[in-house]
């Protein structure tokens, strides 16, 4: 399918899917960028900021596809929507920890590793499916993103497996982070209210199939590092795909759009 | 007529050879294999460019520099730049000359015919030694890694291999 051959119902479903994936990358990339200068060591600072930059590029690719579908300019999509218009999963908008990057950042590295690793595994599953998407521009974008995501997944997998098998303190903190992320990670694994139309048009595989791939992977990974499998990932604080969000998203958007919002008409 | 047209395309390609990667001053976008297609019609030129890394902040600068370079070519009135993703940019698109220029800049070129998921070898761009260590797969820009040469004791960078994943 191309832009010209989409039926109205298909187009609406595609737009929903693109917002979900663009917003997931966008908001997690922003949370990653807040770690700049605060990562555990200098090499990690270089790596994490590079990953965040790639991910912001991926969000931009999805927003450009939305632009082509008449949703307005990519920059405006990123900066001028209200929180209820965002479709990212709630766990991805959560603050990195107490404090801010400017004042007493008591950020939680275990949470960063767990959240990013869980997400990178899902993103890989999503991209594997998207490269066969019926919407050709989306399949092309997915093939591009995959070449970069490959290095991200490798990076977070190393951190996750090493810390999960490290000192008692590391293992304790990591398990607490796993428990925390598990409570809401179900929100990443859903395609939201338009899921039936999204799947019917063959834009991406069924959410149940992709979720199964993710849970199978984590049953194996957690077993490998000697941790218990916590059962079905949950969605305790609501479904971001429905526009349900926490105050953390409000805070993130007001910070990241602060400069742009001073004058949206100018070229930034 | 068609000969004239071909000459114009050659002139445009020459001009593109002068557009450098803003972050690697010795290498042109032509050497990096970023130019997919050039179409010249009645003084209008359309250039299809393959982005290297999707979050690369240099893309806007490259777009501007292409326009600037082409609009000074006699016979060209306007230039349009489009970023396209098919075919995918891969590090195998870098020309032999581009690979040499990367080394001059202290960046080891990527391995040829790399398959994602497989290990690769990197030689020191200064002394050619294979006795090197990977310090960080991520580097100062999206496309580079940081390494150290145990032979000549120089830190250096290498271009991350990128291959089509199908």
Image (tube, rainbow, N blue to C red):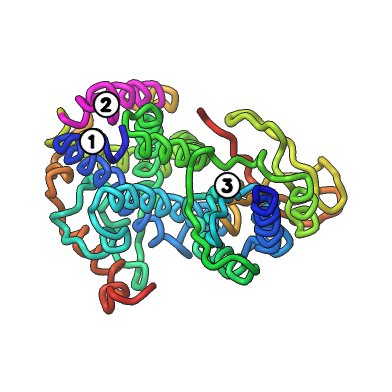
Left or right for A179, reference B60: left
Helix, strand or loop for the magenta stretch, by majority: helix
Residue at 26%, 53% in the rendered image: A93
Q: Answer yes or no: do the residues labelled 2 and 3 have beta carbons within 8 Å?
A: no
Label at residue A202: 2
> In whole angstroms, how far apart are the C-alphas of marks 3 and 1?
28 Å
Residue farthest bottom in this picture: A262
Residue at point 31% right, 72% down? A260
Q: Report if residue B112 is visible in the image.
A: yes
Are discs 2 and 3 located on one and the same chain? no
Q: Residue furthest front?
A: B1
User: Chain under label 3?
Assistant: B
Q: Which residue is under mark 1?
A: A6
Residue B110 quadrant: top right
Tell me residue A42's x, y (percent): 56, 59
| Residue shown at 23% from the left, 45% from the top | A89
Residue B140 x %, y %: 60, 59
SS assignment at label 2: loop
Tell me how far mark 1 sits from mark 2, CA to CA: 12 Å
Of circles 2 and 3, which is in front? 3
Magenta highlight range: A197-221
User: In screen coordinates, is A150 left or right of B3?
Assistant: left
Q: Residues within 10 Å of mark 2 (few under 14, many from 20)?
A: some
């Amino acid at each position: 399918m191309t832009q010209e051959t989409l039926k109205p119902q298909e187009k609406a479903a595609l737009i929903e899917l693109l917002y979900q994936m663009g917003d997931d990358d966008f908001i997690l990339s922003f949370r990653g960028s807040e770690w700049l200068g605060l990562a555990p060591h200098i090499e990690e600072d270089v790596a994490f900021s590079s990953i965040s930059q790639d991910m912001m590029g991926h969000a931009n690719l999805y927003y450009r596809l939305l632009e082509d579908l008449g949703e307005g300019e990519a920059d405006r999509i990123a900066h001028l929507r209200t929180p209820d218009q965002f479709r990212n999963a709630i766990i991805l908008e959560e603050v990195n920890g107490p404090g801010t990057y400017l004042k007493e950042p008591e950020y939680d590295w275990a949470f960063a590793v767990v959240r990013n690793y869980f997400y990178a595994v899902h993103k890989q599953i999503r991209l594997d499916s998207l490269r066969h998407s019926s919407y050709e521009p989306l399949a092309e974008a997915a093939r591009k993103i995959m070449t970069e995501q490959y290095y991200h997944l490798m990076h977070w997998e190393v951190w996750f497996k090493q810390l999960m098998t490290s000192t008692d303190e590391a293992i304790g903190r990591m398990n607490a982070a796993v428990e925390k992320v598990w409570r809401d990670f179900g929100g990443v694994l859903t395609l939201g209210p338009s899921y039936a139309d999204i799947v019917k048009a063959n834009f991406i595989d069924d959410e149940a199939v992709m979720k199964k791939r993710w849970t199978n992977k984590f049953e194996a990974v957690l077993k490998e590092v000697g941790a218990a499998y916590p059962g079905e990932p949950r969605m305790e604080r609501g479904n971001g795909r429905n526009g349900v969000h926490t105050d953390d998203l409000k805070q993130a958007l007001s910070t990241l759009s602060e400069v742009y919002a001073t004058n949206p008409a100018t070229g930034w | 007529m068609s000969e004239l047209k071909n000459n114009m395309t050659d002139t445009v390609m020459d001009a593109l050879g002068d557009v450098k990667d803003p972050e690697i001053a010795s290498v042109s976008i032509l050497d990096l294999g970023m130019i997919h297609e050039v179409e010249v019609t009645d003084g209008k030129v359309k250039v299809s460019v393959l982005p290297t890394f999707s979050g690369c902040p240099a893309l806007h600068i490259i777009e501007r520099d292409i326009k600037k370079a082409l609009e000074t070519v006699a016979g060209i009135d306007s230039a349009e730049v489009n970023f396209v993703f098919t075919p995918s940019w891969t590090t195998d698109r870098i020309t032999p000359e581009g690979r040499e220029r990367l080394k001059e800049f202290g960046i080891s070129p990527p391995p040829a015919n790399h398959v994602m998921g497989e290990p690769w070898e990197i030689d020191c761009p200064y002394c050619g030694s294979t006795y090197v260590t990977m310090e960080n797969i991520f580097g100062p820009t999206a496309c580079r890694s940081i390494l150290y040469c145990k032979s000549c004791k120089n830190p250096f960078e290498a271009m991350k291999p990128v291959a089509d994943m199908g």
